[in-house]
Image (cartoon, rainbow, N blue to C red):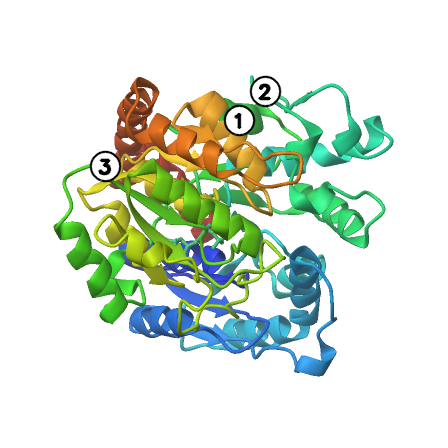
Amino acid sequence: MAAQVAILSGPGLGHLFPCSELARRLVRHHNLTVTLITQSLGPPSDTELSLISSIREEINVVSIPPPPPHSIPQNKNLIFLLFFLSAHNCPHLRTILSSLSGNTNTPPLKALLVDMFYDEATLDIAQELGVGHYMFFTSGCILLSFALHLPKLDETYDGEYTDMLESIRLPGYCQSFSGRDFPQPVVERKNEVYTSYLDLSKLYYKTHGILVNSTEELEPELIKFMKENKRIPPVYPIGPLIRSCSCDGGGDASDDQCLRWLEEQPNGSVLYVSFGSGGTLTGEQMKELAWGLELSKQRFLWVVKRANDEADASYFGGEINMSSFDFFSTGFLDRTKGLGLVVLAWAPQLQVLGHAAIGGFLTHCGWNSILESISNGVPMIAWPLFAEQKINAVMLEEDMKVAVRAKVDDTGLVRKEEIVRLIKCLMEEDQGRKMRDRVNLIGLKAAQAINQEGGSSIRSMKAVVSEWIDL
Ligand code: UDP
């Protein structure tokens, strides 16, 4: 008997991309019927629309309408808004799922897969409908382990984690972390976001199973620990799930411009610079970065967004549709002509990272960007901005040894001298060569996990699918 599952994607491309790739694999490789439920805070971006239209043939997509603008809390941070949205959309979710499970023309609904910022009510909804409740964790095991450990940390420490003198080890993991590198939701314990995130981390223990966009080949220690710990729901590493290029939302003039320009550059010579779909720099930081790139004399492809004092200003798509470079008044574009290419807001990242001309990636350490870089054997400069990106950066540099981390000065800026140092280290020095060799090896193993018959992620996926079918 065929079966159906519903996936509730979180808002933002960093969630929608892996959720749609999971949906596509469940349809193609496991013969399931999948409904992908999307949510957003405002009108979806062109990239989101293009992605959705590219998967509609295979996947039933239902988009929850954005909340009325007047109901959206003002001056709140990204994490607060993610919690707001997941609570706000629960009644819509109940209606959608009730209609799916009551439809006798489609295979029986067996499981609801919720993204990582889920509301407690989703557990009740799944129970009422008699379907399994599973989480699809679209970041890595490093954040998952952190969240699962948070209730214990909360009991053990008073005061702000950022003030902690000693560093913290996550259970089962060799790497230690300073409180200053902890994920964004926990940096201020008196903030309402901290309480919500702590409650969420406790809810993680109540779901029936956790699918995570990682693999034993990338995060072996953490996965082993979580699998052996009986208090933690079964963990299924099913990654790296990377969207296929065909749904890049691209193919437009600027995409062609990037790829044509890369064709003209020598192999391994270009540094790709991008802060993801959500990341933005302050005006001062952009100037330092421009100086650093110019002084390094390395080739670069820089995806630029309008400067903003908030590091996550373009997360909900607001900055994507800009149209000019008016913020570069210094002649930078003229002076770097030929050596560098600057594009507005968006580049076809998958094709860029897969191009032979790319030798390194200066990244904000979003989880998808990390997986895409590793899968293409590209070493990184880790320049984390928000969310869990700082712990990802520590892991990349100190555990995997595939990145070098940017140092921020006392004023919070990465200065041009530091940028030159990082670029030279990655693109010219022995350390960069070693990182490249390592990332090639890890990338190859990760690709086998998901693409080769018998690979660890393929086995995990089969295990969880058969659990759903048996429900
Ligand atoms: N991305 C892209 N072009 C861009 C910027 C981002 O294709 O110019 C894609 C990137 O390939 C990745 C996703 O957007 O799949 C960003 O996800 P990530 O987790 O790296 O960061 P986020 O945007 O969620 O902060």
Circle number at residue 222? 1
| Residue 197 in the figure: left or right of residue 340 | right
Q: Determine the residue positioned at 42% across, 29% down.
A: 421
Determine the image quadrant of residue 450.
top left
Kind of residue sitting beneath label 3: Gln
Q: Give the Cα distance between marks 2 and 1.
A: 6 Å
Residue density around tag 1, few if under 14, some if 14–19, many if 20 or more, within 10 Å:
many
The reply to whether callout 2 and callout 1 are in contact (CB within 8 Å) is yes
Foreground residue among 233 and 426: 426
Residue type marked 2: Gly
What residue does disc 2 label? 172
337 or 282: nearer the viewer: 337
Q: Position of residue 107 (x, y in %)?
A: 41, 68
- Decide if ligand 1 comes within 8 Å of the CB at mark 3: no
Which quadrant, please, contains the N terminus? bottom left
Q: Name the residue under label 3.
A: 452
Ligand 1 within 8 Å, label 2 CB: no
Picture residue at 56% right of the left edge, 51% below the top: 284
Residue 456: x and y, percent?
35, 32
* Observer-nearest of 368 and 397: 397
Q: Compare residues 303 and 164 and report the one nearer the observer.
A: 303
Label 3 packing within 10 angstroms: few (<14), some (14-19), many (20+): few
- Mark 1 belongs to which amino acid? Leu
Q: Percent from the top left, x then y, of residue 352?
A: 26, 51
Return the mark for residue 72: none
Proximity of marks 1 and 3: CB atoms separated by less than 8 Å = no
Q: Earlier in the sequence, mark 3 or mark 2?
A: 2
Asked which secondary structure carries label 2, the reply is loop
Residue 309 vertical placement versus 223 (above, below): below
